[in-house]
Image (cartoon, helix red, strand yellow):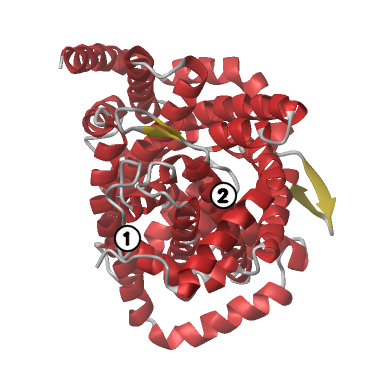
Amino acid sequence: MNKMKVGAAGLGAIGSLLPGWAQANIDQQINDAIKPASDFVSGLIFSSFPVAGVDIPFVLVWLIIAASIFTFYFKFINLRALRHGFELVRGDYNDPKAAGEVTHFQALATALSGTVGLGNIAGVAVAVSLGGPGATFWMILAGFLGMSSKFTECTLGVKYRNEYPDGTVSGGPMYYLTKGLAERGPGFAKLGKVLAVLFAIFCIGGSFGGGNMFQANQSFSQLVNVTGGEASWLAGKGWLFGLIVAAAVGMVIIGGIKGIARVTSKIVPFMAIIYVSAGLIIIFMNLSAVPAALVAIVNGAFSPEGIAGGVVGVLFQGFKRAAFSNEAGVGSAAIAHSAVQTNRPVTEGIVALYEPFVDTVVVCTITALVIIITGTWDPNVDPSAGVQLTSDAFASAIGWFPWVLTVAVVLFAFSTMISWSYYGLKSWTFLFGESRASDFTYKILFLFFVIVGSSMQLGAVIDFSDAMIFAMAFPNILGLYFLLPVVKRELNEYWSDYRSGRLKKTN
């Protein structure tokens, strides 16, 4: 309780200072100070090579190749385990006596809340605008392949997690990179420690930026837009919005993964219903345009006209959006899935298949269809104007629908922040130790950055943090390759029990 009072007082003090900080010249000074490092790191992480006149980032190829290998290695687990995955999510095989803190559904909801966000709304609009309708086809394919990456990393997350006497757990790439690779010998043990530390550092950086400041900043921008733009009474009051959001986030994350899971298990279905329902209403209002849109998606994937880079350009835009939206291969979701109550690690890997499916195949596809059938996609779009494009698409159907979008954006941002706070916290405690002081320090820093993100236009900081998120994919996937036989052994044993009926149902 004392810590909560101290935290509240600290946030209040920060809030009283930020109105004076949030000036354009301060923003510019921060940007100028960070830009050299940001440009260097972003250039390194997003280094690219030309293919048919299109610059393809190496990290994107790294993610897609891994997803393809995992799909074939596990014999299309992303198709054959979907039915059983639904049974697990539904609770048919829950074991309340097993180690862990949350149910399969709560773990999935927490992980989904970290991936279903502004990328599904703003990023898809940009991808369709720059790549044409055909980008949607490749986006769906990349989402399908990404399901196998999620299966692999989430199975390992549970298998190598730390379980503590008080019932709490810590898991994720930091632990399977160290413990899993250590099983292969001293040389691999050293490699595992290096990869784990790199992953944890990248994850902390990503949690403060892309998983926090960017979410707060964009949700505030959308709120200002629908309330009058520059004439809105909210204009210039990002610090106030940030304080409110920080207080709400603080009340959730103070309770740890159980508190986060309770909130996300309610928010995620609610926000998904709001956004998906609004999208489906627009689609049904333009039902006659759907067949033509589907034809444009298929034809545009293989015979694009007037799109820079031809087929490669379209493929790149689709794969980029899917990879950046569902984060398959990045390793972040394995941290949330590791908290599940189960004694069979592969069960959570199977549940995790639904994460890219919902995020990319369902939500991103609905966004793309809305953009295409309303004709609001713009080949000359500014990549930072994705939310406005989607908002225009919603407004073209029903004038007040941008308000629905605003509610969805704020909920998406809020849920993403609380999930990423957990990812960053687990990486923080991996580096600095499991203690109340360590836990409290990280949470106060995280809440501070919520306010900063709402108050300032920190372009260089956001670029840097985005690079951090995708830098996580390099140590994570390298470790996954070495640990594939472990996952296959777990899968074969479990699948044999499932097929033979040896698994006990809860009800």
Cβ atoms at labels 2 and 1 below 8 Å apart: no
* Of residues 230 and 419, the one drawn nearer to the viewer in this rendering: 419
Question: As drawn, is 96 to the left or to the right of 495?
Answer: left
**Mark 1 surroundings within 10 Å by alpha-carbon count, few (fewer than 14), some (14 through 19), many (20 or more):** some
Instruction: Please give the name of the residue rendered at 34% of the width and 74% of the height, measured from the top-left corner.
Output: 280
State the SS at label 2: helix
Question: Relative to 65, is 140 above or below?
Answer: below
Q: Where is residue 219 in the image (x, y as percent from the top left)?
A: 35, 42
Q: Which mark is residue 324?
A: 2
State the SS at label 1: helix
* Of residues 301 and 305, the one drawn nearer to the viewer in this rendering: 301
* Of residues 208 and 403, the one drawn nearer to the viewer in this rendering: 208
Q: Where is residue 6 in the image (x, y as percent from the top left)?
A: 21, 11
Question: As drawn, is 356 to the left or to the right of 109?
Answer: right
Question: Relative to 330, is 394 above or below?
Answer: below
Q: Position of residue 417 (x, y in %)?
A: 37, 37
Q: Where is residue 239 in the image (x, y as percent from the top left)?
A: 29, 25
Q: What residue type is labelled 2?
A: Phe
